[in-house]
């Protein structure tokens, strides 16, 4: 499998000039643990994640290094720590020059890159253009949905997936973080919806694509005010049956 077969295509991004409050709010609202940072031209310049909020002055978790260690590390490291712990803009706390992959990167290479560099997400690039993101959750979905005694995704499956994504994303009701997995004509829809009627609309889109044999709904409903969420009815039934 390749990156383009499992990645999330509708990527939530943020700019370097946005506040860290905006970044935290976007992560919470969209149920993601990290955001690619893009400049005004749409060029990827960094990434901000939950880990960037661990050492913060607001919650009293700044690094407390002894005098001798501060002398050993030098003023530059201490200054960088201060900016990361007190910075108010995304560009001040983000990770610069993030590791990236392209659409054709095999899943095995994706896992090796994540392990080698201790990262949980990899932006997917087409040249200088950000076209998706692969996270550990995408890999988990691939294992849960596709690791069966079935053929590997074919060219026909790729065309089905691309058609479903294209049809869904042209609508205002499209799920956030939409990910579509297809194997042997069996479709798995993943993402976040804030309106229950969007679920059936997405399913109908998939059902109407030529070559689709089954559609499995894994869309999670989220209340935007409280953050309360519900798994799809199909996933709830599967969880109950496994008890």
Image: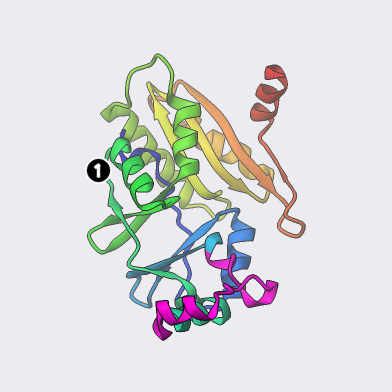
State the scheme by which the image is colored.
rainbow
Label 1: which secondary element = loop
As drawn, which residue projects farthest toward the front?
A: 68
Mark 1, residue position: 104
User: Can the viewer see residue 126 in this picture?
Assistant: yes
Position of residue 176 measured from the top left corner of the image (x, y, whole percent): 55, 52
User: Can the viewer see residue 89 in this picture?
Assistant: no
Position of residue 148 measured from the top left corner of the image (x, y, whole percent): 43, 18
Image: magenta residue range: 52-76
Q: Is residue 232 left or right of residue 161?
A: right
Image quadrant assignment for residue 106? top left
Image quadrant assignment for residue 105? top left
Count of numbered tags: 1
Residue 82 is inside the magenta segment: no
Q: Residue at x 54, y 81 (%)?
A: 87
Q: Is residue 47 left or right of residue 196?
A: left
């Amino acid at each position: 499998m390749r990156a383009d077969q499992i990645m999330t295509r509708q990527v939530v991004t943020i700019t370097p000039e946005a506040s860290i409050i905006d970044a935290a709010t976007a992560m919470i609202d969209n149920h993601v643990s990290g955001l690619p940072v893009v400049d005004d031209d749409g060029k990827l310049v960094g990434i901000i994640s939950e880990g960037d909020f661990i050492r913060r002055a607001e919650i009293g978790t700044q690094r407390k290094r002894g005098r001798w260690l501060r002398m050993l590390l030098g003023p530059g490291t201490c200054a960088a720590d201060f900016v990361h712990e007190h910075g108010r803009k995304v560009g001040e706390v983000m990770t610069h020059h993030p590791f990236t992959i392209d659409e054709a990167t095999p899943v095995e290479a994706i896992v090796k890159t994540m392990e080698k560099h201790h990262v949980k997400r990899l932006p997917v690039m087409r040249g200088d253009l950000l076209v998706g993101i692969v996270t550990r959750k995408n890999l988990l979905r691939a294992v849960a949905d596709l690791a069966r005694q079935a053929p590997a995704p074919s060219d026909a499956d790729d065309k089905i997936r691309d058609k479903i994504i294209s049809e869904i994303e042209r609508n205002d009701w499209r799920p956030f973080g939409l990910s579509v997995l297809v194997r042997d004509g069996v479709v798995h829809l993943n993402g976040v919806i804030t309106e229950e009627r969007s679920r059936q609309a997405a399913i109908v889109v998939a059902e109407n694509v030529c070559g689709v044999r089954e559609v499995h709904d894994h869309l999670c409903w989220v209340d935007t005010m409280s953050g309360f969420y519900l798994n799809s009815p199909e996933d709830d039934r599967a969880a109950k049956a496994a008890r």
